[in-house]
Image: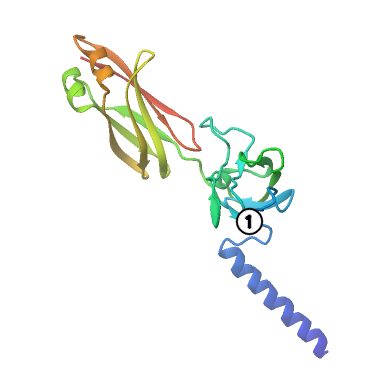
Amino acid sequence: MRRDRARRLGLAAGLVVAGVLLAAGLAFGAAPIIAQGDDTYSASTYTANQGEVVQLQITGDTHNATAHQSGPDGQALFRSPTISSGSSGVQGTQYLSAGDYTFFCTVHPSTMQATLHVTSAGTPQARPSAQLTVRSKKLSKVSKKGLMVAINSTAKVNGASLVAKLGKTTIGQASGQSFSVGQQFATVKLSKAGKRKLMGKSKATVTVTATIPFGSPAAAKAKLT
């Protein structure tokens, strides 16, 4: 009887601990991707739940974890920075649905290949997206101050870039942009070549495109007079 009671108490304690770990977002199978000094990953398969940012841990040399598959932004579906020590998040894994995804180290592609298995537990985070509106209307103001663009974002965006074009010609750009949820504004300043392209025109139609990391690009057109 005492042994049975002890077993029941041990089981109950284990369930409590498991609940605490799950509530904290610590999945039992979500071990970090370990990149080793012999230029290999420590395992052929790693497991994570949906919604988790998997960690890359370096134990020697210089490595990264980069998905073979491309995402909606045209870049790797998930990727980490290339680091020589410590650990870093593999950004993009938080948006994955359940399934298997192969990845590799771009520094050692022949020896470092593995698979990330995403379970059906958890919920994928929503991919960042945005809608653009070009607020500028006057050619004279654009040449002096740049294009004013309103960005309405559904999720926090880091490292976005804005490119303004007249036809196929790039006339201005703004890189390294960060946006919070909701509406905010950014200015795309014109290059000297871009100003020359607009010089002397009485009207022009410009297109502004936003490249959003891990999300689909957004674009807007405006007629300037």
Give the x, y percent position of residue 219.
Answer: 39, 25
Q: Which quarter of the rendered picture does the N terminus lie within?
A: bottom right
Left or right placement of residue 182 versus residue 104 in this view? left
Q: Residue furthest bottom?
A: 2
Give the x, y percent position of residue 190.
Answer: 26, 24
Left or right placement of residue 125 versus residue 119 in this view? left
Q: Secondary structure at mark 1?
A: loop
Q: Nearer the viewer, residue 59 or 17?
A: 59
Left or right placement of residue 99 versus residue 147 in this view? right
Q: Quadrant of residue 97?
A: top right
Residue 108 appears anywhere in the view: yes
Tell me the crowding category of disc 1: few under 14, some 14 to 19, or many 20 or more residues within 10 angstroms, Cα based.
many
Q: Which residue is mark 1?
A: 32
Give the x, y percent position of residue 17.
Answer: 64, 73
Coloring basis for residues:
rainbow
Tell me which residue sits at (61%, 63%) in the image. Answer: 22
Left or right placement of residue 176 versus residue 3 in this view? left
Give the x, y percent position of residue 59.
Answer: 62, 57
Tell me which residue sits at (30%, 39%) in the image. Answer: 184
Q: Nearer the viewer, residue 196 or 163?
A: 196
Q: Which quarter of the rendered picture does the C terminus lie within?
A: top left
Residue 121 appears anywhere in the view: no
Amino acid at dot 1? Pro
Q: Compared with residue 99, is residue 224 higher up or lower down, i.e. above or below?
A: above
Q: Compared with residue 203, is residue 84 higher up or lower down, i.e. above or below?
A: below
